[in-house]
Image (cartoon, coloured by chain):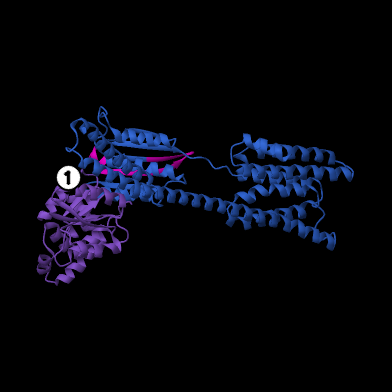
Chain colours: A blue, B purple
Amino acid sequence: MSPRAVLALAARLPGKGSDVRWLGLLLAARLLAAVFAVLLLLVSGLRDLEAELVVAALAWGMVSAAIIWWGTTIRSSPAWWVADGTVCLGLVVLSGDWRSPFYLLWLTALALPAVSVRLRRVPPLAVLASGSFLAVATAGGPVPGSLGPVASETLAIHLVLPAGLICGLAYAADALRRLDAERAQRERLAIEAERRRIAFELHDSAKQRVHAAHLLASSLRGGVDPSLEASLEQTVTELESASADMDTSVAELRSPLEGRPLADALRARADELALAGGVRITVRGHAPELPPLHLAHAFRVGAEALSNAIRHADASRIVVTLEQELGRFALRVTDDGKGLPATTRTGATGLLAMESRAATIGGRLTVGERAGARGTCVLLEIPIEKETTP
Amino acid sequence: MIRVLIVDDHPALRAGLTTVLRAEPGLVVAGESAGGETLEPALRRCRPDVVLLDYHLPGEDGIQVCHRLKRTVLPPRVLLYSAHASPALAIPALVAGADGLVNKGVSALDLFEAIRLAARGDRRLPRISQALVADASSRVHIDDRPLLGMVIDGSTPAEAAETLGVELDQVNRRTQRLLGALRLEIPT
């Protein structure tokens, strides 16, 4: 498969470009191993049964490659790794000699589990791989030790190679994962710092100038020509609105989370609100990894729902749950208050703002009655972008 | 004539305030300062009746500066001038001995009125709600709560010292500790 073909396919596949390139490389290695094994068999001359073996090896090479390429969920399941490894080892056994070229095909079957498992499970995996090949060698082929010192050395290489391969690949995959996480964290911090800087500039420079202009304009009241009085009044009003707008922007720019996890920030807000007395608020669960903007909006929605429950519903018990379910994150605020009014108040800006926040981050807000009891339930659902693993 | 000293770190606002106050009969801008090290010389030079003090100053915040000004011999009246209309600022302002709390968003006429009231010795601070008092007392050390209560009730430091049976110096030190505990993290 040429690099260009891989890239062209990559464009049509979900997931990161580097993941697809890595997958293409793996499959190329696997097909090459299958073809190489078959060629070796053909060159050394086919004996009985080996024609079937050649067909089986080619077929498995193609089928497994197709499954790995298209089966996003299958390729990351341990059952598939076991099945693939068993078939490859089966080919080795059937060929009647543990030094069979199908060994190469088996090696390529180890790559996926090696990059997918956690680092602490890598040593057992390596031992398992070497152990199962030793079992195959003992059971299937000429018994090791019966072939003299040269063969023993070959066996040693055959046993060390899978362990080395697994450890090396696992280490590289783990390093990449850590690098990714670190970069994401750095990006988050940089965005946070930039927003803080803009907020600071807005508050410290622009807003002070607006205050000065407002002060100057308002001092002219009553002292100017009556024909100008109306436009002066308008100017003062506009300046007041500008100042209010800036306050809103500054508040929006400053992330309410300040680096805390969502659950902790909501808990802190709950404690502040509970100070007013008469209400018990519990926060359960925690949020998954989400973009900072999503978390900030989720926090504002949660905080607004909390203060609504206290201010309008006279709730005495509020439960906030954060859950991760099937590709989405759900934030639920349930209270035991008097429920929703029969008709929505005109200008219920709080609710509208919550809905627009949910829409901004591609989420959905549902406000309804609490199931089976008195009270209200506010539910915010945000889709989680699924991470693709190679 | 009421002599006013403007303390604000922002030049545009200082210029605006100077222009506006200069045009108002009865008020005179005795000087201006950006806060920090320039404050002391400005105070000595112009001996103001009223100090219009910004809350956000580089280094020490307006509350701390206010408390320091109020401990001098013949202290000036101090009006805290804040861009944040947060009512939570009322208790720290009261504890620091401020004579008034003015939002930067008010019109010129309201500002003149506030300066005149302060110069006359009228102390006007926003009403302090029960929730604010509860919040403030939950944040201060338990030993400082009686002092906080007395200050909110309107006692002078001297009266507080007498009631608590301690020296005035100690009341001042404890007031400083109160201000530290009540310090607001107002976004800048």
Reading the image, the residue beneath label 1 is: B110
Q: In the displayed structure, does residue A322 sit left or right of residue A281?
A: right
Above-or-below relation of A328 to B95: above
Secondary structure of the residue carrying numbered label 1: helix
User: Relative to the observer, which residue lies in front, A39 or B187?
Assistant: B187
> Residue A74's quadrant in the figure?
top right
Q: Position of residue A8 (x, y in %)?
A: 67, 35
Q: At 82% across and 54% down in the image, what residue appears?
A: A142
Q: In the displayed structure, does residue A288 sit left or right of residue A241?
A: right
Q: Position of residue A317 (x, y in %)?
A: 27, 44
Above-or-below relation of A196 to B63: above
Q: Quadrant of the N terminus of chain B?
A: bottom left
- In the image, residue B10 lies in the stretch drawn in magenta: no
Q: In the displayed structure, does residue B7 sit left or right of residue A331?
A: left
Q: Amino acid at mark 1?
A: Asp
Q: Position of residue A175 (x, y in %)?
A: 59, 55
User: Relative to the observer, which residue lies in front, A212 or B21?
Assistant: B21
Q: Residue B141: tell me if it is visible.
A: no
Q: Residue A40: tell me if it is visible.
A: yes
Question: Which chain is indicated by disc 1?
Answer: B
What is the residue that sits farthest to the bottom in this orientation?
B167
> Residue A64's quadrant in the figure?
top right
Q: Position of residue B66 (x, y in %)?
A: 21, 60
Q: In the displayed structure, does residue A68 sit left or right of residue B164?
A: right
Q: At 73% across and 48% down in the image, what residue appears?
A: A106
- In the image, residue A329 lies in the stretch drawn in magenta: yes
The stretch of residues the image draws in magenta is: A309-331
User: Relative to the observer, which residue lies in front, A55 or A362?
Assistant: A362
What is the residue that sits farthest to the top in this orientation?
A343
Q: Residues within 10 Å of mark 1 (few under 14, many from 20)?
A: some
